[in-house]
């Protein structure tokens, strides 16, 4: 049976005027094989219906109608559109994939990117089906650098998406069975790495410092699946100090906030990598929290190692900021001030010799 190369969904939604919470969504699926989508004897369609028992789902020809409470109907619509997207991009919709999708545990990947098109820069799809993309020029460079190298230094100011992109790449690698686990780490410099003075167990002590990494994971992996990964150490979160003495192999490792790692810590970390490891090290050289007398190992590592085969450096800038529009202007203003102060320090002092007149 020939499957069409292109598919299109045309949607129409109307609300019941008598009951505002009710919604009816009509989707038209064009140029796609209905047998592949709905299955033999509608086995896939019935599985889809079973996943949404409080929604009425009817199919006739190229149209599918979804009726029910607005939120539930919208959820069903989103899942159906993901079914079509998987079938379009992967040329198949296996029952196991559909079951995982409806259970919320399948974060599917796009097909191998082509030379053009917006899907080229989709890294993966999040737990709600939202595409997670490399949105800016340098984020795209970061993805390409990771694909071609084992170690990537991602340098840039806050808000440029370097940590989020790194986590997305790690999740993609795990789901594609390229690695067996993900390790997320960062120096807890605010606590001086002396975590014994903080209350609670290790997780409770380090969690506040790793919140950005958890937030990224929450966007990409279903919560129950994430909990399973954490409990079984498939995804591991730990302070940088706890990497000492380990060999990190068959893993995707992210060292975040690396500007706050000392030279000794960076060397210790990089020498932990096993032969099948991938690593992204992110940092912002304008936000070093180390004591003045301690040099950042992140800066030193970039200077010493960027020329090595298998190691790449990607520099992000204010142009890559994906937060509030003012963040870009704030970063530029601080960068200009820092450059002005640097030039002032580098400028040689002018000495004026005053020759006392002899009486």
Image (cartoon, helix red, strand yellow):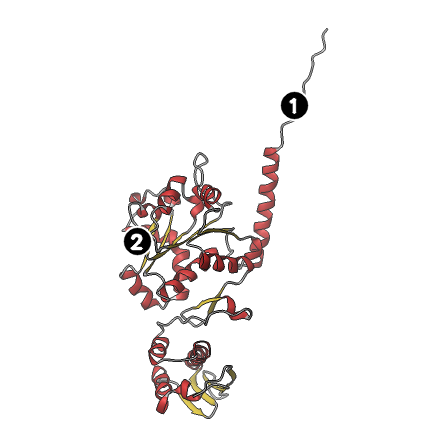
Q: Which residue is mark 1?
A: 351
Picture quarter with the C terminus: top right
Q: Secondary structure at mark 2?
A: helix
Q: Return the disc, 1 or 2, that comes first in the chain's sequence.
A: 2
The single residue placed furthest to the top in the displayed view is 359
Q: Is residue 199 above or below residue 349?
A: below
Query: Where 335 sits versus 51, above or below?
Result: above
Q: Which quadrant, please, contains the N terminus?
A: bottom left
Percent x, y of residue 248 = 32, 52
Spot occupied by residue 78 in the image (x, y as percentages of width and height): 44, 78
Please give the label number shown on residue 136.
none
Tally of numbered tags: 2
- Residue that extends furthest to the front in the rendered view of this protein: 309
Q: Residue at the far bottom: name it.
A: 60
Which is more foreground, mark 1 or mark 2? Answer: 1
* Vertical side of 291 occupied by 103: above or below: below
* Residue at (52, 58) in percent of width and height: 141
Residue 170: quarter of image: bottom left
Label 1 with label 2: CB-CB less than 8 Å: no
Residue 32 image position (x, y, % from top left): 47, 85
Q: CA distance from mark 1 to mark 2?
A: 57 Å
User: Which numbered marker is on residue 203?
Assistant: 2
Q: Residue at x 46, y 78 (%)?
A: 85
Q: Residues within 10 Å of mark 1 (few under 14, many from 20)?
A: few
Please tell me how crowded label 2 is: few (under 14), some (14-19), or many (20+) other residues with Cα within 10 Å.
few
Q: For the residue labelled by badge 1, is the local secondary structure a helix, a strand or a loop?
A: loop
What percent of the width, then of the height, locates residue 91?
43, 79
């Amino acid at each position: 049976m020939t499957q069409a190369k292109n598919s299109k969904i045309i949607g129409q939604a109307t609300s019941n005027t008598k009951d505002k919470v009710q919604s009816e969504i009509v989707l038209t699926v064009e140029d796609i094989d209905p047998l592949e989508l709905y299955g033999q004897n509608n086995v896939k369609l019935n599985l889809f219906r079973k996943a949404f028992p409080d929604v009425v789902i009817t199919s006739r020809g190229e149209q599918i109608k979804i009726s029910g409470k607005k939120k539930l109907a919208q959820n069903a619509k989103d899942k159906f559109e993901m079914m079509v997207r998987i079938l379009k991009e992967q040329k198949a919709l296996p029952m196991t994939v559909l079951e995982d999708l409806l259970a919320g545990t399948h974060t599917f990947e796009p097909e191998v990117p082509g030379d053009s098109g917006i899907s080229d820069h989709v890294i993966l799809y999040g737990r709600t089906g939202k595409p997670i993309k490399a949105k800016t020029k340098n984020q795209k460079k970061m993805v390409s650098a990771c694909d071609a190298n084992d170690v990537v230094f991602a340098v840039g100011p806050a808000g440029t998406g370097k940590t989020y992109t790194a986590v997305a790449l790690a999740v993609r690698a795990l789901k594609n069975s390229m690695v067996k686990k993900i390790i997320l780490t960062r120096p807890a410099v605010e606590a001086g790495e002396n975590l014994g003075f903080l209350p609670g167990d290790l997780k409770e002590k380090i969690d506040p410092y790793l919140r950005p990494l958890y937030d990224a994971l929450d966007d990409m992996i279903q919560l129950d699946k994430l909990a399973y990964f954490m409990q079984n150490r498939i995804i591991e979160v730990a302070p940088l100090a706890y990497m000492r003495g380990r060999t990190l192999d068959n893993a995707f490792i992210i060292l975040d906030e690396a500007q706050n790692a000392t030279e000794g810590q960076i060397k210790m970390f990089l020498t932990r990598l096993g032969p099948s490891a991938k690593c992204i090290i992110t940092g912002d050289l304008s936000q070093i929290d180390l004591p003045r007398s301690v040099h950042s190992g992140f800066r030193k590592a970039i200077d010493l190692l960027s020329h090595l085969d298998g190691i790449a450096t990607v520099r992000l800038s204010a142009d890559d900021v994906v937060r509030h529009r003012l963040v870009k202007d704030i970063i530029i203003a601080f960068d200009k001030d820092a450059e002005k102060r640097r030039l002032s320090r580098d400028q040689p002092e002018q000495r004026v010799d005053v020759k006392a007149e002899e009486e």
